Amino acid sequence: MSKSSLLILKRTIKHPIHVNIMKEYTGRVRSFIFLWYLIVLYPSCQSPTKENKMNERPEETYYGLEDFNNLKKYDAHVHLRTDFDTLFLRQAAEDNFGLLNVSVYTSPDITPEEQEDFSLKLLRQFPEKVAYATTFSLEGYHEEDWESKTMAYLEKSISNGAIAVKVWKNIGMELKDDNDEFVMIDDERFDGILQLLIEKDITLLGHLGEPKNTWLPLDEMTVQGDRDYFSENPKYHMYNFPDFPTYEDQIDARDRMLAKHPDLRFVGAHLGSLEYDVEELAKRLDQYPNMAVDMAERISHLQYQAITNWQGVHDFLVNYQDRLIYGTDLRTGASDIQAKALTQPEEIMQHAHEVWLRHWEFFTSGEEMEVPKVTGKFKGMKLPREVVDKIYRTNAEKWYPMLSH
Ligand SMILES: [Zn+2]
């Protein structure tokens, strides 16, 4: 065998050995990676990291239907005007709700003074269960002493225990000045009153404007509650009054008032009349940090949006969790057909209970739901406990600071 052929033989022998070593090495690396995956990676995929836990909450961070009675809650927008209405207070006691009774100046009905007297009576009878928002008369608005008289009246109400002052949609839709022009909420004659509220640390609760549906024909309105209300109350159905201020005029006047009084603590009743689109409402909440909204009689609008945009509604409720206050607008003789037909005390209490429970289900469960005011199915919001706590209790205490005193 020549020297060169011996070398070739050596190489041929060496080569398979080299390959074998390489194979063995690769095999070991593979086993090591596999073991490392088993020991380190696999368990960390299975048991969530802190961040994963935030996204996939374990069941115990949600409330269930069984928690409804245990949690202390507020319905921060009801109207109790007669002894008969104390039925709502009886049901509220059973369902663990405190109530904010809201006075409204709806001339020529019951006067603000009469409503206040009744609220004070409730306050004496049920001090733990009820608080009240006062309001003021617009009668004599054109007279010179109206502003000073109104301020004196409000000072007295506040010293009597009112925790908020309510203004209503008749500002913007009914009240006119000497030139026959509509008076809007940014009118300078309200400035002194709003300044008084700032000084007294009292919240302004404003039902200003109406749902956008009000400017549509009945058959184009998005929710049954609005169709019922505006067929019952045609004088507020703005579709019939093209010469009145528009929907945008109402929202703009409210926004100008907020811009003019940045220190005023403001709760926009009924989702601030921006019920039709959570994104529009989000814009205003971003723009006016001293503004929150109550949900009274507009939860159906969130449900309506949830049919096609569940995620958008859910994200809105989570992102603005410090600015949303639960309320219903419960009252006897309510215009929705279901409530209107009820006359017996047990039926009225049962209805209040069902309304409260349905809303609780909407906010806490992730179940598919159908409700009387909305055509179509939608899923519940399944909000985390801390968001539910804020909506049902702590936001009301924060935005109406004297509520819990
Ligand atoms: Zn109301």
Image: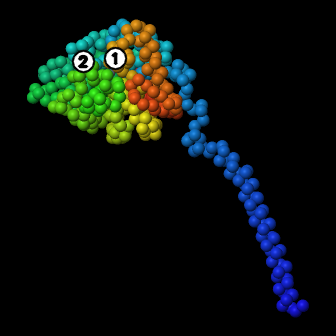
Frontmost residue, 191 versus 99: 99
Q: Can residue 99 be seen in the rendering of this structure?
A: yes
- Rendered image quadrant of residue 106: top left
Upstream in the sequence, badge 1 or badge 2? 2
Residue 175 x %, y %:
18, 24
- Location of the N terminus (image quadrant): bottom right
CA distance separating discs 1 and 2: 15 Å
- Rendered image quadrant of residue 178: top left
| Label 2 sits on residue | 106
Tell me, for residue 238, which label it has, or none.
none
Residue 37 x %, y %:
71, 53
Q: Secondary structure at mark 2?
A: loop
Q: Give the residue type that dot 2 points to.
A: Thr
Residue 87 vs residue 255: left or right?
right
Residue 315 x %, y %:
45, 39
Q: Which residue is depicted at the point 22% across and 30% down?
A: 239
Residue 38 vs residue 343: left or right?
right
Q: How is the image coloured?
A: rainbow
Taking the view exactly as shown, the residue that stands out farthest to the bottom is 2
Q: Give the residue type that dot 1 points to.
A: Ala
Q: Residues within 10 Å of mark 2 (few under 14, many from 20)?
A: some
Frontmost residue, 217 versus 207: 217
Q: Which residue is depicted at the point 81% across and 77% down?
A: 15
